[in-house]
Amino acid sequence: MASKSPSARAREPKLAGPRQKTGVSRYYQLYALLSNALNDGTIAPGSALPSEPELASRHRLSRTTVRRALERLEHESRIVRLRGSGTFARQAPLARKLCLNLHTFYEDLPTIASKTSVSVLKFEPEDVPAGARDVQSQLGERPFVIQRLHKHQGTPYQLSTAYIPESVGRQMRRSSLGGSTSIITALDKIGPKTVSAEHTMSAAAADDIASRALRVSLGAPLLRMRAILSDAKGRVRAIYESLSRPDHLNVRAELERDPARDADSSWRLRAVETGSAKR
């Protein structure tokens, strides 16, 4: 590997000194540092990473610690290690994306479900999470948590978590939540029917759980969607949250406004009939 200039080496981030207590394992610090460098292009696709001895010397780590960080990156398919040649950043393959349309949101879900597989990671009562305290009175002290991993063509693209009232959760069966069954379908079978959903969308950085489940680097950008599902009486049926890989899922919308009105007429989501969603 070609040696770097002193100025280039000086710009490279280094881990905290060995005596600094950060509460995070040394291997994980190196993993996070290399993950961010791969994610932001500091280490470009196809280029070589520093050798194990160089990483160990630069960050004052043991070879075992360095090897553990590299093994995790290799498991995530972020790098390729070639015996006798070195370690290289992988070129991420172009993925065929799923598309979720805001103007036909719930009509699209069955189509997407038919193209994906779902596995249930968790189905059990837990304490109310901080993000759901505003509706705690309707969820109860220990709502059921349903966490599922969604895959498209064998690649995980979405990690979803639903919080449902304990009384409703005890009427469900874990075996009924796999396959293509949506949370709304499972809730409607128990009743009463879900008739409204309040959605918010934002960006989120992959934490340790999401990075492992979705096979992305720590801190990678994810699409975060949250929905409050309610019945006709305004009672909360579920708080639903999902983290999706933007390289595998697009969210789009078609907007329109009345052509007969003046230029200041309001834009709105395009009106469509059920079952006639444009693909």
Image: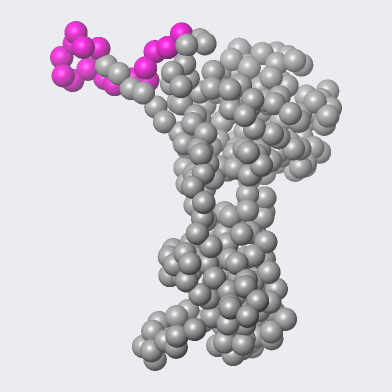
- Residue 275 vs 111, above or below: the answer is above
- Residue 202 vs 216, above or below: the answer is above
Nearer-the-camera pick, 108 or 237: 108
Identify the magenta region.
258-273
Q: Residue at x 52, y 26 (%)?
A: 198
* Residue 268, magenta (yes or no): yes
Q: Position of residue 176 (x, y in %)?
A: 80, 25
Extreme residue in the left direction: 262
- Please tell me whether the stretch drawn in magenta is mainly helix, strand or loop: loop
* Residue 234, magenta (yes or no): no
Nearer-the-camera pick, 5 or 7: 5
Q: Residue at x 75, y 15 (%)?
A: 189
Q: Is residue 275 visible from the viewing direction of this image?
A: yes
Q: Quadrant of residue 159?
A: top right
- Residue 184 vs 122, above or below: the answer is above
Q: Residue at x 81, y 38 (%)?
A: 124
Q: Quadrant of residue 139?
A: top right
Q: Position of residue 106 (x, y in %)?
A: 55, 20
Q: Position of residue 25 (x, y in %)?
A: 68, 74
Q: Quadrant of residue 240?
A: top right
Q: Position of residue 121 (x, y in %)?
A: 76, 42
